[in-house]
Amino acid sequence: MNDSKAPTKDPVCGMTVDEATALQAERDGTTFYFCCEHCRTKFLSEVPSAKKDGGCCGGKGKAVSKEAHDHSKKPSCCGGHDQATVKPSSASKYYCPMCPGVASEKPGDCPKCGMALERNPSWVAPKAGKTLYTCPMHPEVQQDHPGECPKCGMALEPMNTNADVGDEEENTELNDMTRRFWIGAVLTLPVFLLAMAHMIPALGRQAWVAGDVSRWIQFGLTTPVVWWAGWPFFKRGWRSILSMNLNMFTLIAIGVGAAYVFSAVAILLPDLFPHSMRHGGKVGVYFEAAGMVTVLVLLGQVLELRARSRTGSAIKALLNLAPPTARLIGEGGDKEVPLGQVKAGDKLRVVPGDKVPVDGEVVEGHSSVEESMITGEPLPAEKSVGDKVTGGTVNGTGSFIMQAERVGDDTLLGQIVSMVAEAQRSRAPIQGLADKVAAIFVPTVLAVSLITFVVWMWVGPEPRIAHAIINAVAVLIIACPCALGLATPMSIMVGVGRGAQLGVLVKNAEALERLEKVTTLVVDKTGTLTEGKPKLVDVLSGDGFDAKEFLSLAASLEQNSEHPLAAAIVLGAKDQSLTLDEVKDFRSVTAGGVAGNVKGRVVMVGKPDFLRDEKVTDLESLEAMAVKLQEDGKTAMFVAVDGKPAGILAVADPIKATTAEAIKDLHELGLELVMLTGDNRRTAAAVAKQLGLDSVEAEIEPAGKVAHIKKLQAEGKHVAMAGDGINDAPALSEAEVGIAMGTGTDVAMHSAGITLVKGDLRGIAQAIRLSRATMSNIRQNLVFAFLYNALGIPIAAGVLYPFFGLLLSPIIAGAAMSLSSVSVISNALRLRNMKL
């Protein structure tokens, strides 16, 4: 088997399998391989039916890692569960057969039980231009059209990372609520004035104001307010009762409906009420309460929808980095096409000033491209044939032709947008507390409202039934489960978006929450603290030799070598615009050095022992110079010309210009900094001393990094790991939070919870500040939501009446309820302008 071939995976559970021993099945001319008979049977059946497995769990109901899975040691990876398979909705591409509500657009593991998500056989790909919608409070709810969440009643939001979602489609809900609010407000204002006429001298003296005319006007104006402007609330409230997902709209519908129906019956059928309920010969009406509460809730919805639309600004800003069109080169010449029509392999022309449309490779021409969105560097990078270019970067003054390699969501920009969108919809562990409270909140409020009604009917002053209804309605109206439900997801959405603007990509909310608690940061050296590329840093010439001359000779010789340090010498010479000459009689000695003839002179570059073997003497003075270089973590290479010592070339992996500042920031944040590296002890110690790191472990293997992280965790420390290489992936996974440098490998980024797009270590300090600010914001929101409901509901029930004679009008309760949600959202939005 070809070693370069990608590992074969079971299409059902995602495990890596051996084709030689695995079970097989063929479909559409393609052979698929399976870890066990159950997975093969499930694949062939296409539509899941009864399922008894819990994924690769050994039949014990607990997920285990795929690496630990071994059929020879376990009775079965697919048995031991008597649980019916969850039937997936057609909206999600992947789902968990064991956990209701777990759905995803990408393959992966179930966050609840750990088993691999399975492809949904009933999933239908959305049509081109179609947008999927989800609920910000219940991300498992997904559909391909706007609407309301069946669980909480909130308007669904677009979840696709798609720039084609127009403002008109996005603002449908906002426009509808705004129209209902203004019409409702215009109709309700006269009702409110008539109800409060006794407090307005000029109006209160009019005889008709206290008569039937006023009551019928209030009835006529309030009816469309309640049953048209407030219709969405009744619809959502009724749906919540049918589905038994009681929510804020359940309370609003019951409260407003009770106030309106009582008042309407009082006008239409007044004889149904006993004489004791009549004040001045008439039964009291509460149309102003029903109308004002409806209008105030509408106002709250409008403010909430406007605020929530701003949380998507980070994703929109990222999407706007990509151009809407591309210049496709065809047989008939160039043609401008929508970006969505570009396919891998297409030839595209990029003219001066244009944005690069997709990821690809330059095949003709050259230019300079401004790549600050990726690298953070303001200076343009030169691009010529064979160089890679990234979609969303800006072309300079040149023109070139490129071949598209990655398009759509596969581009670097697409992957960043997808990661940000998915992280914004993820749930932080702290949200579990709010979820538990919210689950019992509405039934509790309904019970409190009923108790309020009974108590006021039993011991309240006359008119008892009026007091009972008003206070029971006030309890229903003031309660706000949305403030609890929004406390965490709003802060997460805004915080993740703010991080994306700064180049800090958060994989999920859990990583953001864990990062706040980190006390120790473990860092790799190469590519994290340093640039990751050897560079010529010192040219020290011996007696009788010119530095540029002997560098030119050494670089000419090294251009024939394949050693990584040789490339650094050649590049260093080119940076100084030195001419490289042809080499004759080139030879290389393993672990020694290289030698050859350059311009008629015998040149040797290598270790001192190699030069001595070549009969070069008097190396003592150069060796003395090399000691200081080596103490500074540099690699010294000795150069001899015509049998005489010519000088030393020192090569090092330079520390990034921003690393020292980043280390200072991290120390100020109270973090302990530990460097784990596979490099030699002397170099590692030199770097650690220069940067002021707290401790260093050198010459350590990838497995050793994992062991050291476990050791730190056993000491009670909360550990984050920052790295960029494939060898860092196990340690990134083991740490409580893995931080990958965006300039590193895909493996490292997939293993990490946080990715720094620009590969700048200062981003870690920004990420920690972001985490701390976001978690603080969440706690503020939760405290506010708990206190608001804990204080508001008893006051609405009338507990202050015996002491202060204070009763809370349903109008005031409605205003307070609307403002509570808006306050939580406004507090979350403060993160958008936070300095990090």
Image (cartoon, grey):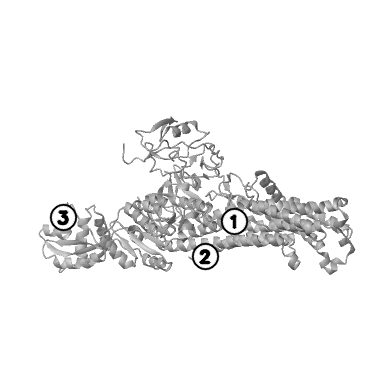
Q: Tell me the kind of residue under disc 2.
A: Met
660 shown above or below 301:
below
Apparent side of residue 149 relative to residue 464 in the rendered image (left or right): left
Q: Residue at x 71, y 60 (%)?
A: 796
Q: Earlier in the sequence, mark 2 or mark 1?
A: 1
Residue shown at 53% from the left, 63% from the top: 776
Q: Is there any visible trace of residue 311 in the rendered image?
A: no
* Residue type, numbered disc 1: Leu
Residue 119 position within the rendered picture, expressed as x and y whole percent measured from the top left = 49, 39
The residue that disc 1 covers is 486
Q: Secondary structure at mark 3?
A: strand
The residue where tag 3 is placed is 596
- Residue 403 vs residue 648, the one in the foreground: 648
**x%, y% of residue 526?**
32, 58
Q: Secondary structure at mark 1?
A: helix
Circles 2 and 3: CB atoms closer than 8 Å: no
For image coordinates 23% across by 60% down, the residue present is 579
**2 and 1 marks in contact (CB < 8 Å):** no
Q: Earlier in the sequence, mark 2 or mark 3?
A: 3
> The N terminus is located in which quarter?
top left
Quick one: SS at disc 2? loop
Residue with the mark numbered 2: 834
Q: Dot 2: few (<14), some (14–19), or many (≥20) neighbours within 10 Å?
A: few
Whichever of labels 3 and 1 marks the residue nearer the N terminus, that label is 1
Residue in the foreground of this view, choosing between 784 and 303: 784
